Image: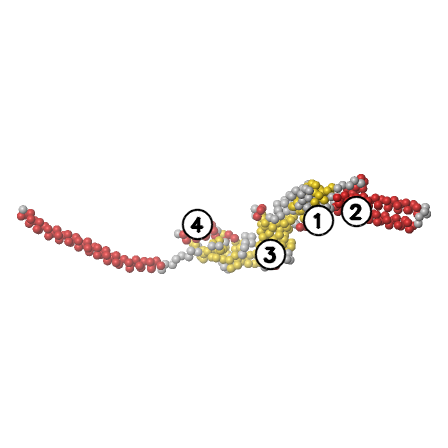
Amino acid sequence: MFRTVSRWRVVAPLVIALTLSGCGDRGSQTASSTKSSAAAPSSGAAAPAAAGTRKASDPMEVRVRPEMSAYFKVGKVTQADIAQTVEAAGRIEADARRVARIGAAVSGRVTEILAEVGDTVRRGQPLAEIASPELTTAQLNYLRAYSASTQAERAVDRARQLLQADVIGSAELQRRESELTIARAELRAAGDQLSLIGMSEEQLSALRTSGTLNARLLISSSLAGVILERKLSTGQVAQPGDSLFTVADLSSVWVVGSLPEQVARQVKPGQTVEMDVAALRGRKLTGQVIHVGDLVSAETRTIEFRTEVVNPKRELKPLMMVSMRVLGEPQRQLAIPIEAVVRENDRDHVFIRLGPDRFRLTAVELAPAVGMLRPVRRGLQEGAEIAVSGAFHLNNERRRAELE
């Protein structure tokens, strides 16, 4: 028992000493870690400062990789003959010289309609029929004039025979010849009235032969073309001067445009006009200015001008919308191909060459396209090297590099 206690008295101090020694080692390690942590902020603060001193790359520049060289072409900005253009909105209209408004020459009631809007008619083709008391009266007057003229001719023949027989004097013969002249004049006037109403010479001859009055009158087309408008119905009373039908020859049409008064002086007869018809899927037409108006519209402050276009297939219909470009005299000015232009942020840009494999996207101001060229207003100088084709691929490469 004594021996066991003695052993613990010897071993216990040794265990306590070893325990305290281990704690001291861990404390020293903790202190070292604390010192290192305290020193870390100064080291970390220096790192951002070093990063901020690096120069950032220009997002508008792009470096061309060798495998991209086949996708674009470089060229110099040069001058070209460019015709100044004036753009205007236009519409198709029937040629006013090829339009006829057809009506009745006498008052009458419409009894039958023989043609409709859109029908193609020939000259002299009946369009409608009317019953007119005035026509009856005019025919009766013609028959009276014809009878008076016939009687006057017979009276002159008898007077000549009597004069030869020395029964009457020459004064009587002259009086009867004067009456014949007046009767013939009245007959011609009555015939002209019936011709204006619409009766042909054959109908007048039949009227003289048969003496039968016809109260019905045909309204015939005075022009070969297409019926654009009909303003009558069965039973309607038509009056002289009423436009009942509108017929137009659409083999040739007008394209009428409107110009702001500020630019109207730039358009003159004889200039070439390029036209795009939206209804014909962008079909392009070419014509010449044939007239520029002299009056300014009070409502729109515009001046009308027109050009003439042949229309053999009648594809161009009245009131179709047309985009018009009037070409002026060619002038030498800087121009670049359309393929060189990149649209970015609602502005026109081009890629200017900075070096063998470096390009920069640069904003420029360009005029509307004329053919396949865009005239340069500002932002480029003659001789500058730009990407004249493949600018789209260069811009995609620039965006990809910017995202990376």
Q: Which residue is mark 1?
A: 241
Residue 127 visible in this rendered orientation of the protein: no
Quadrant in the rendering for residue 151: top right
Residue 267 image point, x, y percent: 61, 57
In the image, what residue type sits under mark 4?
Glu
Which residue shows up at 69% across the image and 42% down it? 235
Residue 127 image point, x, y percent: 69, 42
* Element type where label 3 sits in the image: loop
Q: Which residue is mark 3?
A: 299
Crowding at mark 3 (Cα within 10 Å: few <14, some 14-19, many 20+): few
Horizontal side of 379 relative to 43 (left or right) equals right
* Element type where label 2 sits in the image: helix
Residue 71 visible in this rendered orientation of the protein: yes
Circles 1 and 2: CB atoms closer than 8 Å: no
How much space separates mark 1 and mark 3, taking CA atoms?
31 Å
Q: Of the two numbered discs 1 and 2 on the same chain, state the one appearing first in sequence.
A: 2
Q: Which residue is mark 4?
A: 67
How much space separates mark 1 and mark 2, taking CA atoms?
20 Å
Q: Which residue is mark 2?
A: 190
Q: Of the two numbered discs 2 and 4 on the same chain, state the one appearing first in sequence.
A: 4
